[in-house]
Amino acid sequence: SFTIITFPLFVILFYTELTVLYALAMRLEARSVDARDTFRTTALRLLPALGAYLLSTLPIIVGAILTAVAFVNAGKDLLASGDASQLSAAAVISFLLGVVLIIAGIILLFWFFFGHIETLIAGKGPIVALRSSFHMVRGHWWALFGRVLGTVIIISTVVYLVNSILDWLTITTIMAKVFKASEEAQNIGKLVVSTILGVLVAPWGYAITLLLYKAMKKDV
């Protein structure tokens, strides 16, 4: 039931991301952006983009599942025996295999980093888009990894600092001390602040991704 609920939500959020990416790409090319054309084009290319994205993240997803299963099995073994040395071989193998898949998946993720963007901008199929992304990143893997990591660190730091300031100003000071809001109301307020901040910051991340895509595309 959890998957039934979360997957449609993921698809909706993914479609929203693609829509913003497409609109930004048109603006970067100095082309006019028509809302109807943006939504229609994004809808037509949603499935190929989703396929490319899921294929590029598949090793990480499988690795995370195996690691989670290993932790669950290890917990059961510890509860049953109380001795860490009695962990089952299946739990250990599952954990090691999961870690290997996650590491390999991160490497592949950056090789195929622009796969879903190629389906969106160039209208390619999932496999062709992943192959194209591989050719773009070839020779630039570490550069791409460093830039993405640096961008994530900078944006995360800025978001954390701004969110902390807004949380202190709006929740701790105004809602809690001035209006004597309940704990539930304060939690809702924190969620609203975080959501608004995320919506404002996300396009910057998308824009940086597109700039990296265009830079890599020129070198192919």
Image (cartoon, rainbow, N blue to C red):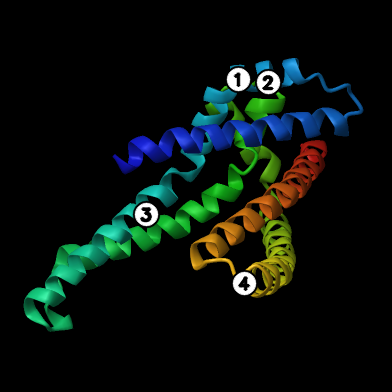
* Marker disc for residue 72: none
Q: Are the residues tagged 2 and 1 within 8 Å (C-beta)? A: yes
**Cα–Cα span, label 2 and label 1:** 6 Å
Q: Secondary structure at mark 4?
A: helix
- List the residue tagged with mark 4: 176
* Mark closer to the observer (1, 4): 4
- List the residue tagged with mark 2: 39
Q: Secondary structure at mark 1?
A: helix
Give the mark nearer the N terminus: 3 vs 4.
Answer: 3
Q: How many marks?
A: 4
x and y percentages locating residue 30 in the rendered image: 92, 28
Is the residue 85 above or below the residue 102 in the image? below
Residue lying farthest right? 30
Q: Secondary structure at mark 3?
A: helix
What's under tag 3, amino acid-wise? Gly
* Marker disc for residue 63: 3
**Cα–Cα span, label 1 and label 4:** 44 Å
Q: Mark 4 packing: few (<14 Cα in 10 Å), some, or many (20+)?
A: some
Give the mark nearer the N terminus: 1 vs 4.
Answer: 1
Give the mark nearer the N terminus: 2 vs 3.
Answer: 2
**Image point (68%, 20%), residue name:** 39
What's under tag 1, amino acid-wise? Ala
Residue lying farthest front? 179
* Mark closer to the observer (2, 3): 2
Q: Left or right of 82: which side holds 119?
A: right
- List the residue tagged with mark 1: 43
Q: Secondary structure at mark 2?
A: helix
**Cα–Cα span, label 2 and label 4:** 41 Å
**Image point (66%, 38%), residue name:** 135
